[in-house]
Amino acid sequence: MSTPKELRYTKEHEWVKVEDGKVRIGITDFAQSELGDIVFVELPQVGDELEINEPFGSVESVKTVSELYAPISGKVVEVNEELEDSPELVNESPYENAWMIVVEPADTSQLEELLTAEQYEGIISE
């Protein structure tokens, strides 16, 4: 199972990548493997405001529907439209092609509360 060291993580299994002052968000390899085959992804619209730890969308698999939780507060500036037609990308490429949204953070200090790859691996190995 892959846990890229350069990313940060949440206990709810989202990953976060800081790029040019913005934050790219997706779900982890562990999360997609637990969910099984992803059949639908519901994401917010560009311009939506997110609140940290509040749901911003959902992922539906053949087994269940799972909420997505905002790892940071801010404004959605980009949405991965490709997931609408190809939700299976979440299973195939959770870190590269299946990023979900890009957010302009309201408070970058919230990033310090996110888990390192080592801390996240500690949680999922329990």
Image (cartoon, rainbow, N blue to C red):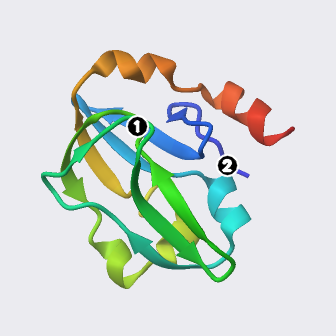
Residue 118 placement: quadrant:
top right
Q: Is residue 52 above or below residue 42?
A: above
Position of 14 with respect to 16 (left or right) is right
Q: Quadrant of the C terminus?
A: top right
Name the residue that disc number 2 marks.
2
Q: Is residue 100 left or right of residue 21?
A: right
Say what amino acid the circle numbered 1 marks: Lys
Q: Is there any visible trace of residue 11 in the rendered image?
A: yes
What residue did someone put label 1 on?
17
Q: Residue at x 51, y 31 (%)?
A: 6
**Image disc number at residue 117:** none
Task: Name the residue: 73% across, 52% down.
Answer: 1
119 w.r.t. 102: above or below? above
Instruction: Please name whichever residue, 81 or 71, is drawn nearer the observer in this view of the structure.
Output: 71
Q: Amino acid at mark 2?
A: Ser
**Residue, x 77% and y 41% (percent of image)?**
124
Q: Is residue 25 left or right of residue 21?
A: right
| Mark 2 burial class by Cα count in 10 Å: few <14, some 14-19, many 20+ | few
Task: Give the residue displayed 63% in from the left and 63% down from the top.
Answer: 32
Percent coordinates x, y for residue 26 in the rendering: 45, 52
